[in-house]
Amino acid sequence: MASSVATCFLLLLATAVALTALVSAWRRPVRVTVYVQEYLGNGTKTTEKVLVRGPGPVNPSLYEPNNLFGDTLVMDDIVTASPDNTSAPIGRVYGTYMVSSMSRPVYVVSFTLLLTTGRYNGSTIVMGGIDDSSAVLEHAVIGGTGALRGAQGHVVGKVVKKYSSPTHVVMELDVYASVPVSWTQAEEAPASPLIVDH
């Protein structure tokens, strides 16, 4: 009896591994690095504004004026190919973030990266997660459009301190994702050894 249970378990495990390999074979990796130019404060170049003032209380770990629990900001940040803010724009980041802790520096974020040049011109990557003032932030890639339709993966972000100031923050975003292979590409790919035609 124990032997048949072990055999069934091994068969299920082998099937799961085979299906995982088959599904991953139908996806193409995507690797993109961009730099988000965030302009803070009240100047003419400001790219982030308060959308909703939260009910509070004041979160002591955050700076005024956007330090009330529930404060929600909207962003329209410029995206460049290098951290230097004088480099040519290659897209935008649109989205929102909200103060989501009463005591810690935590924001819930939802944003979309729109690329406007190159191979992915007109395509988007949708991301979400939390920012908690870690040295390295990680967000989930939860979708995409255009050439990035069906994207899945994660994004690693960090502040590029050399180029940042109190009113200008440069974020490096490294996108590690994959997208489904189109049927035309799949037809050109060799058949999986797991599929047997009879």
Image (tube, rainbow, N blue to C red):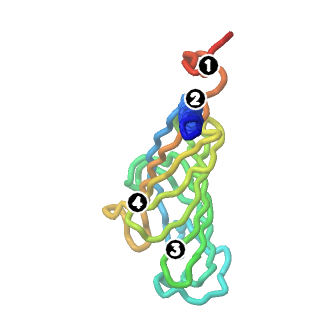
Mark 3 vs 2, N-terminal side: 2
Of the two numbered discs 3 and 4 in the rendering, the one whose residue sits closer to the viewer: 3
Q: What is the distance, in whole Å, between disc 3 and disc 2 at their CAs? A: 38 Å
Q: Are marks 3 and 1 in contact (CB under 8 Å)?
A: no
The one nearer the camera, 136 or 47, is 136
Task: Say the numbered circle drawn on residue 158.
Answer: 4
Mark 3 vs 1, N-terminal side: 3
- Where is residue 127 shown, x and y percent of the image? 58, 54
Mark 3 vs 4, N-terminal side: 3
Question: Which residue is depicted at the point 33% across and 64% down?
Answer: 161
Q: What is the distance, in whole Å, between disc 3 and disc 4 at their CAs? A: 15 Å
The one nearer the camera, 29 or 167, is 29
Mark 1 vs 4, N-terminal side: 4
Question: Which residue is depicted at the point 41% across and 49% down?
Answer: 87
Residue 76 found in image quarter: bottom right
Q: Are marks 3 and 4 in contact (CB under 8 Å)?
A: no
Q: Residue furthest bottom?
A: 57
The quarter of the image holding the C terminus is top right
Q: Are marks 1 and 4 in contact (CB under 8 Å)?
A: no
Mark 2 neighbour class, 10 Å CA radius: few under 14, some 14 to 19, many 20 or more: some
Label 4's element? strand
Question: Which residue is depicted at the point 58% across and 64% down?
Answer: 109
Label 3's element? loop
The one nearer the camera, 72 or 138, is 138
Mark 1 vs 2, N-terminal side: 2
Question: Which residue is depicted at the point 47% across and 56% down?
Answer: 36
The quarter of the image holding the N terminus is top right
Q: Amino acid at mark 4?
A: Lys
Task: Say the numbered circle drawn on residue 106.
Answer: 3
Q: Residue furthest front?
A: 1
Task: Say the numbered circle drawn on residue 22.
Answer: 2
Q: Is residue 29 left or right of residue 158?
A: right
